[in-house]
Image (cartoon, helix red, strand yellow):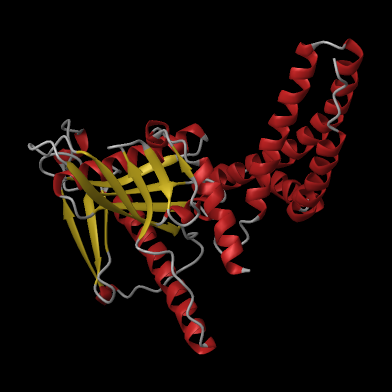
Amino acid sequence: MAELDISEQIALLRSTFHDIRSVVGVDRLTAEIADLHEQAGVPDLWDDPEKAQKVTSALSHRQSELAKLGSIQSRLDDLEVLVLLANEADDEESVQEAVAELAGIQKVLGDLEIQTLLNGEWDARAAVITIRAGAGGVGAADFAEMLQRMYLRWAEQHKYPVTVLDTSYAEEAGIKSTTIEVDAPYAFGTLSVEAGTHRLVRMSPFNSAGKRQTSFAAVEVVPLIEQTESVEIPETDIRVDVFRSSGPGGQSVNTTDSAVRITHFPTGIVVSCQNEKSQIQNRAAAMRVLQSRLLLVQREQEAATKKELAGVITASWGDQMRSYVLAPYQMVKDLRTDYEVNNPSSVFDGDLDGFISAGIRWRKRAKE
């Protein structure tokens, strides 16, 4: 059989890996790990559990990032040896093993390369996702719940800590809205490309005539601000309402007025939280989400002002960014990037990485 020659592909991978190491900054990463190690070794660290959790989480993430870089270096070195052994053995199985390892390294490097594009001001933050049912009646409420499950499954597959802060259930089926917190490094930068209007086309189970129906849902993604930061919110600008948590199954939290709803008068933003059993905890969580949303509003206003001063109007992301078609054919397509797949079931099961990667690259090109 012919000799396996993938030297050009390996050289390209090494070049890409070198660029990624430069962007990540291995020396900086090593210094951060040393600093976090020192913080984690303080005897009274766990006197403040929240601070301790942040320190240990940041340390774990950076150690994992450094270990991943080391692993790729080793895999590239081993791949060259694997190719030599495959050519010496001259058998199909060894060749296929080398080709499979090449594909595996290409995927890992592709994922790392995407992360290097996340260099926005808040990209490294955790994310708060809010999903709201739009036009489409009961079908839209059901679609909103499908999207909620989709993002929860995506987070679970990546082993990202995820919390459902609040869910408002619709009367017949589905949900009116939900707020989810994904507490992972670069969650905002990664998920921010998911913001926009999502459209579902299907033979709706809620349509007695059995006709095809279109439903819409809006997805909002904001960065979660740190507690050390502050967005001034005067008490006179908000109204705080307390009520009993709602939801199917009769949870124990339904027995007291522990849920909190905060209305911000100047912007009309309303935030609810009923995940915690304590009213104090729910209020604190709701205030964090409100501050995060106000931070995003502030950012958008500043960006709009800069565009106006520059006299340039660029195209926005658009009202409709992705279509999920279940009938008469099967397809999910991002209307900004043209990335599409023909397996909606896998997408609703959380297989979003292809769409997210395409969206991040598209956003980068649009800014150039």
Q: Residue at x 79, y 44 (%)?
A: 17
Residue 141 lies in quadrant: top left
Indicate the position of residue 148 as horizontal and vertical percent values: 33, 42
Image vertical order of residue 181 relative to residue 192, above or below: above
Q: Is residue 61 left or right of residue 344?
A: right
Residue 342 visible in the shown view: yes
Using the image as rendered, state which of residue 176 and residue 361 is in the foreground. Answer: 361
| Above/below status of 119 relative to 259 | below
Please give left or right for residue 333 compared with residue 263 in the image. right
- Give me the residue at 52% from left, 53% from top: 359
Rendered residue at 82%/10% (across/down) = 91
The image quadrant that residue 170 belongs to is top left
- Seen in the image, is 244 located left or right of residue 362? left
Q: Nearer the viewer, residue 296 or 258?
A: 296
Q: Position of residue 216 (x, y in %)?
A: 26, 52
- Can residue 120 be seen here? The reply is no
Q: Is residue 112 left or right of residue 161?
A: right
Quarter of the image where the C terminus is located: bottom right
Q: Quadrant of residue 100?
A: top right
Q: Quadrant of the N terminus?
A: top right
Q: Position of residue 328 (x, y in %)?
A: 28, 37
Q: How many marks?
A: 0
Foreground pick, 211 / 147: 211
Image coordinates for residue 18, horizontal then vertical, percent: 82, 48
User: From what the image shows, is residue 81 above or below residue 329?
Assistant: above
